[in-house]
Image (cartoon, rainbow, N blue to C red):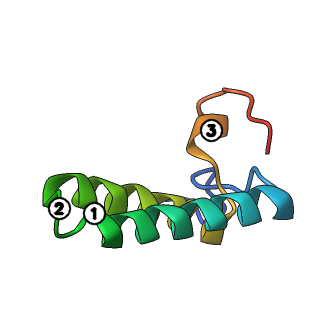
Amino acid sequence: MPRNSMRFQRNIGARGRWFRGIGALVLFTGGVFLLCVHPGVSVLFFLGGAFLLFEALRGWCALRACGIRTRF
């Protein structure tokens, strides 16, 4: 694989990274609160939070990579 691959190239700025980071925090918190009541839904919240955290840390948005215009 070439060293300067286009995979996961940054496509969001600092504002979008903060937005996704806060979204990850909200999903993780919701997952903790739902853990005892709905464990299956809690797992989905944790997975969504992990993906948003990945996007925030990497500076990459999956929707933008697919060509969909996002606000942040």
* Crowd class of label 2 (few under 14; some 14 to 19; many from 20; radius 10 Å): few
Locate residue 65, reporting x and y percent: 62, 38
Which quadrant holds residue 34?
bottom left
Amino acid type at image mark 2: Val
* Crowd class of label 1 (few under 14; some 14 to 19; many from 20; radius 10 Å): some
Say which mark, if any, is on residue 34: 1
- Closer to the chain start, of discs 1 and 3, is 1
Q: How many marks?
A: 3
Q: Residue at left 15%, top 61%?
A: 39
Quadrant for the C terminus in the image: top right
Q: Which residue is mark 3?
A: 65
Locate residue 61, reporting x and y percent: 63, 48
Q: Nearer the viewer, mark 1 or mark 3?
A: 1
Q: Secondary structure at mark 1?
A: helix
Q: Which residue is mark 2?
A: 37
In depth, the one of 8 and 28 nearer the eye is: 28
Amino acid type at image mark 3: Ala
* Crowd class of label 3 (few under 14; some 14 to 19; many from 20; radius 10 Å): some
Q: Secondary structure at mark 2?
A: loop
Q: Nearer the viewer, mark 3 or mark 2?
A: 2
